[in-house]
């Protein structure tokens, strides 16, 4: 990688973090507050209802103790429920609760209001969203790497 590409990728990461901080700050007033780890777990469970704790921990790239702590926090606040697997009573499945869905709805409205007018071209929104989805997928596939660890 050359110096120009290194600088561009650093700038991209820095801007993603800066935008994320603004978005995170707006969440505090609009919806249930949680830690960044709890947010990662909640996001995965919401997008994959019925997932197992093991699959969710692997997908979020959290060590088991951090995953367990985040999951307990979400359960304590009534945002996640564990159900016994109907095919294998030794396993549990994780589901977002109605409270989590209400929270997500409030968050959707707050974040949509926050970003309203920042990008008005629907094609540009789709392009940025697609690029960020690709980045997320690529980062999630880096084997054995935890967030924050060097490559």
Image (cartoon, rainbow, N blue to C red):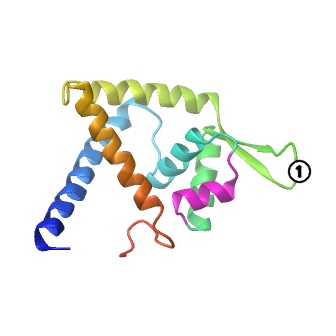
Say left or right for 35 vs 49. left
Question: Is most of the magenta stretch helix, strand or loop?
Answer: helix
Q: Position of residue 142 (x, y in %)?
A: 45, 67
Judged from the image, the secondary structure of the residue bearing numbered disc 1 is loop
Q: Residue furthest left?
A: 4
Say left or right for 150 vs 55. left
Q: Residue at x 24, y 45 (%)?
A: 19
Q: Residue at x 11, y 67 (%)?
A: 4
Q: Which residues are magenta?
A: 51-62
Say left or right for 26 vs 98. left
Q: Position of residue 17 (x, y in %)?
A: 26, 53
In the rendered image, which residue does mark 1 sit on? 89
Quadrant assignment for the N terminus: bottom left
Q: Is residue 24 magenta?
A: no
Q: Residue at x 39, y 29 (%)?
A: 30
Q: Position of residue 96 (x, y in %)?
A: 63, 37
Decide: few, some or many residues near mark 1? Use Cα within 10 Å; few <14, some 14-19, many ≥20: few
Q: Residue at x 65, y 39 (%)?
A: 49
Q: Is residue 61 magenta?
A: yes
Image quadrant in which you'd find residue 120: top left
Quadrant assignment for the C terminus: bottom left
Q: Position of residue 29 (x, y in %)?
A: 36, 32
């Amino acid at each position: 990688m050359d110096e120009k590409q290194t600088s561009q990728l650093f700038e991209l990461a820095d801007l993603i973090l800066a935008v994320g901080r603004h978005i995170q700050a707006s969440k505090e007033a609009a919806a249930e507050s949680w830690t960044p780890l709890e947010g990662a777990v909640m996001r995965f469970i919401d997008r994959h209802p019925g997932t197992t704790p093991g699959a969710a921990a692997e997908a979020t790239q959290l060590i088991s103790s951090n995953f367990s702590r985040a999951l307990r926090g979400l359960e304590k606040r009534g945002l996640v429920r564990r159900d016994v697997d109907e095919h294998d009573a030794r396993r549990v499945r994780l589901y977002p609760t109605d409270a989590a869905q209400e929270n997500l709805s409030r968050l959707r409205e707050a974040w949509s209001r926050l970003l309203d007018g920042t990008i008005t071209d629907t094609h540009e929104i789709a392009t940025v969203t697609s690029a960020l989805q690709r980045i997320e997928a690529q980062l999630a596939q880096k084997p054995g790497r935890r967030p924050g660890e060097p490559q």
